[in-house]
Amino acid sequence: MSTRRPGLFEPRAIGQMAPATKILLYTILIVWAAFVLFPIYWLLITSVKTPAAVNQGPFFLPFIDFEPSLHAWKELFVIDYEDTLRAYMNSIIISLSATALSVLVGSMAAYALSRVDYAPNLITILYFVALLAGVGVAVGIYDVDWMLATAVAVALFFLLARAVGRIYEVRLGNGDILFWIISQRILAPIVVVVPIYMMFQSVRLLDTHLAIILTYAVVNLPIVVWLMYDFFNSIPRDLEESAQIDGATMIGTFREIILPLSRAGLAATTLLVMILSWNEYLLALFLSTTKAQTMPILVAAMNAGERGVLWWTMSVTIVVMIIPVVVLAVILQKYITKGLLVGAVKG
Amino acid sequence: MLKKLMTGSALALATALTPTVGSADGHYDGVVINILTRPGPVIAGRIAERGEEFKEMTGAEVRVAEVPFSELFQKILTDWATGTNSIDVGVFASGWGVELVSGDLVANLDPFIEADDKIDLQDIAPYFRDFNQKVQGSTYFITLDGDFQMLYYRTDVLEEAGLEPPKTWEEYLEVAAAIHGKDMNGDGEADFGSCIFKKRNAQSYFAVQSMAASRVQTKGTSEGLYFDPETMKPKINNAAWKKAFEIYKATGEYGPPEELNHDIGDTRALAIGGRCGLMIDWGDIGPLSIEEGSQIRDKVGAVIMPGSTEALDVETGELKACDADLCPHAVDGINYAPFAAFGGWTAAISATVDDQKKQAAYDFLSYMNQAAQSNVDVTLGWTGYNPYRNSQLESTAAWVEAGFSEEAAENYLGAIKESLNHPNMASDFRIPGAQQYTGVVLDRELARYLADEITVEEALENIEEGWEEITEDFGREEQAEIYALSLGITN
Amino acid sequence: MNEWLDRHMGRLFLAPAVTLILIFSIFPLVASLILAFSRLRLRGGGFTMRWVGFRNFEKQLFGSEQFHLLGTFTTVSILGWIVGLAGTGLLIWWMVRYARTRFHWVGFLGRMITFGIAVGLLWLFCATLLSGNPFGTVGTTLFYVFVGCGIQFLIGTALAFACSQKLRGRTTFRVIFFVPMMVTPIGVGYTFRMLADVTKGPFAGVWQWAGLGDFAWATDPWAARIFITVADSWQWIPFVFIMMLAAFESVPRDLVEAGDLDGASPWQSFREITWPHVMPIAATVMLIRAIEAFKIVDLPNIMTSGGPGIATESVSLQAYYAWRSLDLGQASAVAYILLFVTVVICVSFFNLVVLSRVRAQK
């Protein structure tokens, strides 16, 4: 008992937190949780309000200051269940497939960029891009058959690529490729909507899942590449090097060593990409008419224009849109923790 | 999104429908008509229901697709122009359609109408028959809904204050001032003298045109609100529009505090909650006032949009007191010009669909438009359809059946009748680029004026400049020609 | 075969991503660039296009849309002159210093472009905000980007750090904090419109009680902008949070604990060990967030429709409205101006801030 009792802001033991710090942290976390949850709570109770209860509000507590009613839920899931469930299924199929595609392709590219040094020739790239743009313009604007245009372009590329490449030697590095990839997200989607629409129209893929899946996968690819690049970079290289000495191929190393080690990053990235595709509106609107309509379009549709917003049904659609993502987040949360444990064991 | 809000009306509907359904002959078996419109139940809901009946009668299947209102027109235009053709019939504002017609995207309906003995064109109110459905003299659109704005007032509030419904915009402001701050729904809170939506990129540009119309247009529909038809010089930078802008802003004094961010949905919610003394709106307030939860059942009256005792002298750009020369249609020295805002929901058939489908689509639209069907539909608030046929106004029976009191129905129909057949009805923009002229330039400058960013003079100057630019872009001569035709001027 | 595969594995790993991006970006980019220089009208069987040269850009930068994109220019106030001249001086000094120490023409060219944009934005700031003139969509967008992202980064990082500590119940907090990201952006817009309603929203009572009954946030330019930033932050702080959390979690725990044993204060160990480790991810997170923020469109569109006046309209929203009124040429021109500004700012941030920090660490 001779030792002095530690002060409020001093930890009791190494690796532990002082009680006052703890209280402060909890207060911050709880206040923030309230700020985060209140809008969700408001959505939930609005979804069980009658139009009159919304318009004469504010009312806060169901059963106490207003009588809850399931009319909005009924409208969506009993009377109109076909439309709602179709949109719901579409959203699930599209965002899962797009996420899978995007994460797979993106993390492969990110891994390659973090481990292999590339030095593409700028002139060859410009030549390639010019050909590609030519194909696009020929098909999109001048209605040339796309098979023909592609064949001509491929032939031209392989015939002349080396010759063109020798004109002037300027080489790019990995950083340039990386920045080029992320820069794909900079252009506002509004201006590319019409060209993308025309592209899919020319291959007759409008109003199909495939069109939206492909578009979403590409749109989210830059994010996957960037995030995964950072995560892969933070993994020490000695493991792979020893594996490679043992004769493992790049695919083998990637699958057996890198992916398990970057689980936390993969989980976070998957979640993010999933959410971005789940919530996207403008591209989905244009690439679908009826068969492939997704949930966000349903949400927007609840603004009945001159009839005002149907707050009650809109709240229902927003709430039901949150549910699957919460489930996914809880599942992936485990992986994030597991990934950490692996790191701890290894460390 | 369909089949909502039908409680109460379903029964009336069923009885009204059965006699009109002919024997099922199935001559359109296998034909599918894809219709694109805004999300229901408003507009779309009724199309789907009538589609079911039509299928029983003819075998043709009607599929209704819905996209959010703000993207509807873009979607139809892209679909038709790029040859995607997943949509056979578009339902939208007829004013937008002129752009489609000028791009050869819409089927000319003249031959179908000639062969149709059920549509009874003479029953359709003249504005909708001769202006709204037509472009350059041919019919391209079928009206499903008649749109123009009217003034609504709370009968009980005005009576209590001993006031008459306003006949001019000056009176409107006086009445609004007199009743502002009274409790109008018995909840103990002060309510508002006037509710007029003022949100940007919503409907505010319709309201200001309603206010300007009676000062700008005096000589009948063919005079037009916007341009000198010869030169396409905008008729906007003048005392009449200036006054309209000022009145519009002044009504905000007696409105809810966040009126600048209110679109028509917010305003209607307030109105139905009994918080507004005066409001301007399309025909919908009438049917909405009798819906469940409404606080203003049988307490709301309608009159023709207020007019003006002075009008624009085109020569000088100044306002002049009305006389027989200047305002030939004036009543008691007041010139009225009810504004056909938006023009109403109308249907158009894509030019590229094959003949059988075209005929089937036309038959369906005609079916919806015929008095037997539409006279029921317009009495139901949830359909979003407003009257456009004279027979819809002849008897109050259908309206009383829908839930109006005899008195309220008479009042409501009286106001509609007066507006609908008015020789000086003002036509909405019906030339290519309509959305850019009003929805973008006029709307934005109006919003900046309301937000005190600029003065009214600056706003009008900017609009004039902006309109001239759009006209140049589209080609002055073409625009002048289409504008003249849209007003029925043929020379 | 296997040997060939192995030799080209590097390329094969990269190829699918690059191919997909090329297919989906080059044609739309070229097509919209062509649009930006023309007038397009959709009509039967396709469209008609008229080449108009720089007219779309001219209209935006110098013509009748100048007030809309850039702002209204009248006179520059004394404060505006002082700040403008001082800032320009600083930027010139920076350029001169670079040119004198290590000159390379690529670096110089890049810095010249950065310099040009920086001077332009500086004077835009001085001539509008500091001189009491209303600014246009570029100013509004920069407000959303710098103020919004700044707040989101600070709060998000702080929360992530707190949640990376050993606290009971932190898993629950993590999931809760992540919820706003799951709400579709359109939904966020409508939800906050509901919450902010001063007559029937949940805070109506508080509002009246505070004597603000007649003040509506939506009618005051700054209140509206700030409110949109609040909604935007509500939605995006979780993004910063989850990324920074993953970053904090990847900091080797033994390093931190070793620091603790050595008697380092929490602040010291954060600054010396944790922060350097998470810095690269933090930079990436900021960059991604900023890129998304430049494109903000749903929230102002739904919450205020760009009003009052043009106070809350972003560049992207301006392009959207032009596009909606079928003015595809103006829409593309505006979007390309935004693209240019965004690329320059992001590249500068990346090269001058991130890379130099990374270099300094190595």
Image (cartoon, rainbow, N blue to C red):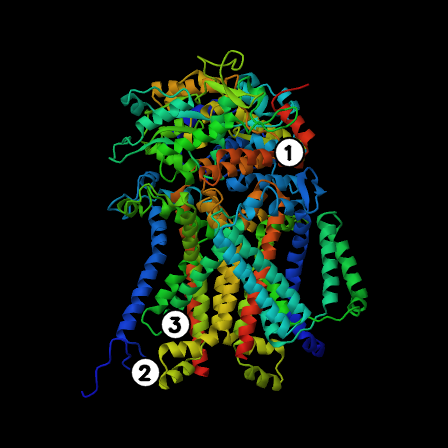
Corner quadrant of residue B151: top left
Chain to which the residue tagged by mark 1 belongs: B
Mark 2 neighbour class, 10 Å CA radius: few under 14, some 14 to 19, many 20 or more: few
Chain to which the residue tagged by mark 3 belongs: C
Task: Return the mark for residue B471.
Answer: 1
Corner quadrant of residue B78: top right
Identify the residue at the far top of this view: B324
Q: Nearer the viewer, mark 3 or mark 1?
A: 1
Residue C294: x, y in percent?
53, 56
Instruction: Look at 45% across and 70% down and name the residue there.
Output: C246
Residue B276: x, y in percent?
34, 31
Q: Return the residue at label 3.
A: C164
> Which is nearer the eye, B450 or B27?
B450
Chain to which the residue tagged by mark 2 belongs: A
Instruction: Look at 55% across and 80% down and name the residue there.
Output: C362
Residue C165: x, y in percent?
36, 73
Observer able to see residue A193? no
Instruction: Look at 42% across and 19% down and name the residue there.
Output: B415
What amino acid is found at the position of numbered circle 3 in the picture?
Ser
Q: Return the residue at label 2.
A: A14
| Mark 3 and mark 2 residues within 8 Å of each other at the beta carbon | no
Q: Quadrant of the C terminus of chain B?
A: top right
Query: Cα distance, mark 2 to mark 1?
Result: 76 Å
Residue B305: x, y in percent?
44, 23
Under circle 2, the secondary element is loop
What amino acid is found at the position of numbered circle 2 in the picture?
Ile
